[in-house]
Image: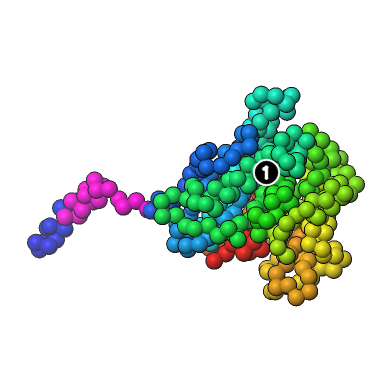
Amino acid sequence: MTLLVRLRKPVLAVFFLLSWLLPVAAAPAQPAPVELPASAYDAQGTALSALVYVPDSARARGKVPLLVLLHGCEQDARTFFEDSGWKDMADAHGFVALLPAQKHNLFSMVGTGGLGRYGNPLGCFNFADRLNSPLKGFVPSEAAAIASMVGAVVSGKGLGANGPVVDAEQVSVTGLSAGAGMAATLLADYSQLFAGGALFAGVPVMCAQSMQSAASLCGISVSRGCAEVKARSGGYDSREWTKAVQRAQHPAGRPRVLIVQGTADCTVDPQNALYLTNQWTAFHGLKTDAPVVIGQEPSWPARAVRQGYAPVGANALWVETVLLKDVGHVMPIDTGNPQRPCGRVRVSETKTYIEDVGFCGAALAAGFLQLEQ
């Protein structure tokens, strides 16, 4: 037996012992959302708070877009961000995400005084609460609070040391369900602030003047059968909407609006997609009977039906509506392509309102809102 053979076993034993004792180099830690200091914005007397997510790719990018992401009822901001595909989009494309969060408060709709008025029993954003708003113009106080959060992040709050610079001309908002209702309210009431928005299973602006009446007037239900989930005829007060359009100060073509709706939605009446399309084409002075196609068609699954609207000569759609056949009340994700991650399905005892339907809603919206590098 040679000396090399005699030494091989002891050397291997020492090697494995050292490899067990010495610490293994950890993978680089992924950034996590951090709390936006309450002192940085005006909460307008609401119960809202917020997180800010700055991916490493945003720090490398320099001047970056900002996306405001609004969760739906019975959801929380952090989990919705992680599971909906939006964290994947932020990591891949390098934009900052602002995650406002609603407080669950079972007593928030019992009376109007004291702490009981703040928050929402199901954790929904109070998108329709104009009657109880103390603000001039009856803008919902939660919308004003979120607008103040946007201003804080644009000014550098919550971005950390050596953080990226947010481009004030590239601020967008998106949401699901009540989050989409609040996103639409923000686009209407603060149209000068947002370049665009993406509304998933949303309802028209001003479909109701209070959250107590929103369920019956806006076609929303968490308990009734599909046939009973109906928005009122017209979907909103067109006279009030006309006034809102007339007083809105916004550059031509802003904000651009994407409307995504599942046709098998039993929580929000799918007819709301038509009402939203009517609202935002009217906002931009476009005709709903004149859809257009601009640029290369993306790869659409057979279940998606698209209608786009823009004036002659525009190089991008100003309003786009996408109907997803046989899709319910969910944020659509696609976990089938590991090369292009889009969300995750979480094991939960309660409904998460996020479903793998082979279609990535966040990727669709990121492209429409021009968040990609």
Assign the magenta stretch its main secondary structure: helix
Q: In the displayed structure, does residue 289 sit left or right of residue 23? A: right
Q: Secondary structure at mark 1?
A: helix
For the N terminus, the image quarter is bottom left
Q: Is residue 287 above or below residue 237?
A: below
Q: Is residue 52 above or below residue 94?
A: above
Q: Position of residue 258 (x, y in %)?
A: 72, 58
Identify which amino acid the numbered label 1 is placed on: Ala
Q: In the displayed structure, does residue 5 sit left or right of residue 230? A: left
Q: Position of residue 200 (x, y in %)?
A: 71, 51
Q: Position of residue 207 (x, y in %)?
A: 82, 44
Please give the residue where the numbered disc 1 appears in the rendered image. Answer: 143
Q: Quadrant of residue 368?
A: bottom right
Q: Residue at x 10, y 63 (%)?
A: 2
Q: Residue at x 24, y 46 (%)?
A: 21
Q: Which residues are magenta?
A: 11-27
